[in-house]
Image: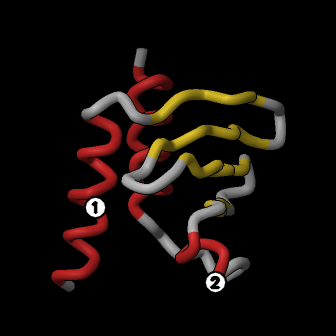
Amino acid sequence: MQMRSSIYRKGAELFGAGRITLDVETEKGVYLFVSGEHQRYQVRLMSDGTFNCTCPLGSLKAGRGVLCSHVIGAILFESQTRAR
């Protein structure tokens, strides 16, 4: 459980620091850029509920719905954007 909370905390920090930007939005989903500690990654949040990230963790676990900090940050970004 501690690993999950640290991933959430890191995602919240990315969001809070303004390190997430919208790339493009389509009817199928939203594409965002997340500036991580080491480089910039792309996160896709699809309208069918699926998601992925181009970070090493997301790439290793592609198709398995792995929640990395970049995806968490992107979800927080989108939830705040939609709340406005």
For this orientation, the residue located farthest to the front is 38
| Picture residue at 70% right of the left edge, 78% below the top | 62
The amino acid sitting under disc 2 is Leu
| On screen, residue 39 above or below 77 | below
- In the image, is residue 61 above or below residue 12? below
Which residue was labeled with disc 1? 8
Q: Residue furthest left?
A: 2
Do the numbered discs 1 and 2 sit on residues whose CB atoms are within 8 Å? no
Quarter where residue 1 is shown: bottom left
Q: Which mark is residue 61?
A: none
- In screen coordinates, is 8 left or right of 32? left
Q: Position of residue 37 (x, y in %)?
A: 37, 53
Mark 2, secondary structure of its residue: helix
Disc 1, SS:
helix
Residue 49 rendering spot, x and y as whole percentages: 65, 58
Identify the mark nearer the N-term, 1 or 2.
1
Q: Is residue 5 left or right of residue 72?
A: left
Q: Residue at x 34, y 38 (%)?
A: 15
Where, quadrant-wise, is the C terminus in this rendering? top left
Total number of numbered labels? 2
Residue 2, percent across and down?
A: 16, 82
76 over 44 or under it: above or below: above
Whole-percent x, y for residue 34 in the image:
51, 43
Q: How is the image coloured?
A: secondary structure
Please tell me how crowded label 2 is: few (under 14), some (14-19), or many (20+) other residues with Cα within 10 Å: few
Q: Residues within 10 Å of mark 1 (few under 14, many from 20)?
A: many
Q: Is residue 72 above or below residue 31?
A: below
| Label disc, if present, on residue 60 of the rendered structure | 2
Q: Report the side of 42 relative to 74 (left or right).
A: right
